[in-house]
């Protein structure tokens, strides 16, 4: 990769591996995860529960639990590997350059302090001034009505959608270049969900803010994201432009996820489902981790861990596209037989 290409990427994750240490055995939570986020880009990370999405966000923010350890790989922010930063330097980076919006705002906000006090603390922790006018203007920016009068209110006095907006306001106060949004719309009704998605798009368009949008909902991802990374059992199994991904998924898991999304074109039909479940970290199968649920599995899939391949500008981790895997009937990115 050229220096210019590397600098054009705000966040670069290469070969990231995370292990959780337990009394019984180490549990491999992430394996060889590689992707990037460019300035002003919204990148979706999707997959079922247990696929590693939340572990990924915690690793990126340096918020893994005490038994979690990054054992391999690189996390580069503006070309600097954050894994080698001193803890105090990482804390300064977190909030000022990198910010995270958590899934449950009620558990993320302190119930014993007013909203205004909590926002002042965030500013002061990073050397900023916590004056009421600045805080109120940020709250108004994210759609909190009569913000000046509500600075003394407590989290329980706001609706779920308003609390989520307050979390977004906190993330924006220090004008970070990258926001990690972890399932931020999962607990909202469709009206509030649409408002939050529109707000994220406005931040991208008006301020150039990049967003890593973590979700299990492909319908939401289709509305807001530019690119999508699909995860399964701690692995990135596909990455593509959002239009290409929905038009022609490459990985069997992505194909199965899309088949399970409700659509007006299949009204009256029974929804498809993916048989089985995501394997436990303590009992991952050898070879391809999707093998027990895959409609295209061959014996080689139980023996060979798929490689992360680049095909026509998109990426996939699947033996079905790898001429070196031994898979019978290897395909090209367009679905046709690969040339020998």
Image (tube, rainbow, N blue to C red):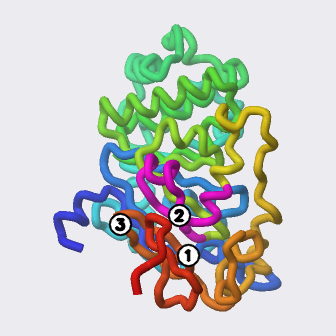
Q: Is residue 220 above or below residue 21?
A: above
Where, by quadrant of the figure, is residue 136 drawn?
top left
Q: Which residue is mark 1?
A: 318
> In front here: 194 or 10?
194
Q: CA distance from mark 1 to mark 3?
A: 15 Å
Q: Position of residue 24 (x, y in %)?
A: 82, 84
Question: Do the numbered discs 1 and 3 sit on residues whose CB atoms are within 8 Å?
Answer: no
> In the rendered image, is residue 75 in sight?
yes
User: Does residue 247 belong to the magenta stretch?
Assistant: yes
Question: Do the numbered discs 1 and 2 sit on residues whose CB atoms are within 8 Å?
Answer: yes
Dot 1: what SS? loop
Q: Which residue is mark 3?
A: 312
Q: Quadrant of the C terminus?
A: bottom left
Magenta-colored span: 235-256
Mark identifier at residue 290 = none
Q: Which residue is mark 2?
A: 250
Give the total number of marks visible in the rendering: 3
Residue at position x 61%, y 89% in the image: 304
Asked if residue 150 lies left or right of residue 299, the reply is left
């Amino acid at each position: 990769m050229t220096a210019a290409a590397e600098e054009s990427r705000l966040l670069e994750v290469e070969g990231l591996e995370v292990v959780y240490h337990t009394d019984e055995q180490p549990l491999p939570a992430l394996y060889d995860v590689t992707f990037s986020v460019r300035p002003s880009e919204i990148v979706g990370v999707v997959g079922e529960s247990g696929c590693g999405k939340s572990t990924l966000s915690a690793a990126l923010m340096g918020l893994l639990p005490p038994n979690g350890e990054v054992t391999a790989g690189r996390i580069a922010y503006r070309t600097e590997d954050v894994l080698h930063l001193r803890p105090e330097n990482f804390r300064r980076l977190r909030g000022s350059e990198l910010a995270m919006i958590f899934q449950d705002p009620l558990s993320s906000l302190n119930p014993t302090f007013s909203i205004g006090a909590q926002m002042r603390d965030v500013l002061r922790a990073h050397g900023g001034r916590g004056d009421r006018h600045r805080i109120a203007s940020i709250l108004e920016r994210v759609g909190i009505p009569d913000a000046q009068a509500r600075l003394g209110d407590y989290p329980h006095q706001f609706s779920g959608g308003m609390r989520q907006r307050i979390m977004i306001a906190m993330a924006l106060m220090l004008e970070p270049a990258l926001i990690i949004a972890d399932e931020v719309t999962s607990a909202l009704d469709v009206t509030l969900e649409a408002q939050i998605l529109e707000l994220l798009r406005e931040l991208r368009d008006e301020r150039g803010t990049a967003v890593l949008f973590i979700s299990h909902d492909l319908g939401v991802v289709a509305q807001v994201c530019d690119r999508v990374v699909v995860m399964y059992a701690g692995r990135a199994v596909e990455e593509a432009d959002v239009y290409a991904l929905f038009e022609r998924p490459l990985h069997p898991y992505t194909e199965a996820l899309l088949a399970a999304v409700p659509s007006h074109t299949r009204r009256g039909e029974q929804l498809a489902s993916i048989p089985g479940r995501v394997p436990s970290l303590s009992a991952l199968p050898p070879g391809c981790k999707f093998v027990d649920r895959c409609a295209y599995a061959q014996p080689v899939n139980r023996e060979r861990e798929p490689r992360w391949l680049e095909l026509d500008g998109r990426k996939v981790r699947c033996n079905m596209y790898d001429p070196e895997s031994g898979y019978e009937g290897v395909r090209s990115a367009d679905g046709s037989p690969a040339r020998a």
